Amino acid sequence: MHLNIKEKVKNLPLSPGVYLMKDSQGHIIYVGKAKSLKKRVQSYFQDLKAHPQKIKKLMANLNDFDYILTDTEFEAFMLECKLIKEMKPIFNRKMKSPKSYSYIVIKMEKGHRILEVTDKFIDNDTNQYFGPFINKYTAERAIQGLTEAFKISCSNPFMKNGPCLNYSLGLCIGMCLGGQTLVHYDNIINKIIDLLSGTDFSILEELNQSMINASEQFDFEAAAKYRNRLDAINAIIYKEKVIEFTEEDKNFVVRESLTESTFKLFFIRGNKVLFSGKYHLGSTNELELLWSIKEKILTYFNTTSSPTKVSKDDLDEAQIIYSYIKSENCSFKIIPEKGIKSKKTTLIDEALYELIFHYK
């Protein structure tokens, strides 16, 4: 390890930023982000024995580090994401491998729809896809939770030669027997599709009620199972909300205060930050400030193509933006498309004026 590295850590600022850890050859082996660079990097050197094995290996290979300051934690998140994708550091496994992205697919098998998790998205086939999801295990847990909760885990699906083993174990409603049970099965699949599409969340209400009923009957093991199923399903629903939010293609102007008189402004469209700027109230008159920002919005809007579907390569940025806009760290205004495309830009003026001068 570099002799002066601990001294370098002591001199780090408390501001947000990204740190780039390097080995003895000068290669970037890990990229991380921090709300406070000093506190985060210091944590690697404290209580070393208690660190997980991954961090111990990282520290064993660490020889030096660089850092990049940002004005906000949000920018640190976005920069970290960009650098990891560009550099593919060996210790950043999570964002490095495209194989970590998965989809839930509903496809036909022997004339009936089944649920699966897949790593492949095939355009224009007859299957129905939901996702992408960063964590395959989360998607698999959600599907397992749904199949267990509604007893659609058939070990011999749609074979009309008698009930399957899971039916005798109480894990299958009996669609392997055919008849009316298949109608019930189709209704369950429709409800799952509605859940994944974000149009009907009644399944979550049913599972929550089942959890409450189990608790009231002191069956805490069953209640815990329902809770775990709900957690897994909510995790994938969150990802679906991120994708839906991003594909709505809204134009966000986002403000975050840095000091009482200084603020950062972002123009965000889809999963892209089109421009950002730091501004100081009082450095120029209100009209000049509004005009300057409005001109940038119009310029970037007119020179940037509209995002379409969110691919697995876009999901990380989309999730960071979604979390930021939904957080309490910032305030935002949505500028309607017609407000930007029309020659009359009063909608932009009103949104900017309220955001900048009536900020709460």
Image (cartoon, rainbow, N blue to C red):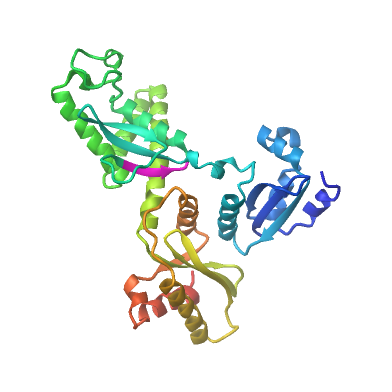
- Look at the picture and state if 57 lies above or below 39: above
Apparent side of residue 99 relative to residue 344 in the rendered image (left or right): right
Apparent side of residue 200 relative to residue 136 in the rendered image (left or right): left
- Look at the picture and state if 258 lies above or below 140: below
Q: Nearer the viewer, residue 314 or 147?
A: 314
**Residue 21 on the magenta segment:** no
Q: Position of residue 53 (x, y in %)?
A: 68, 32
Q: Nearer the viewer, residue 96 or 235?
A: 96
Residue 213 visible here: no
Q: Position of residue 136 (x, y in %)?
A: 45, 36
- Look at the picture and state if 207 lies above or below 68: above
- Residue at coordinates 49% horizontally, 72% vertically from top-left? 359
Apparent side of residue 282 relative to residue 4 in the rendered image (left or right): left
- Residue at coordinates 54% horizontally, 69% vertically from top-left? 276
Main secondary structure type of the part rendered in magenta: strand
Give the number of callouts: 0
Residue found farthest to the right:
3
- Residue at coordinates 74% horizontally, 51% vertically from top-left? 65
Q: Position of residue 126 (x, y in %)?
A: 25, 40
Q: Which residues are magenta?
A: 129-134
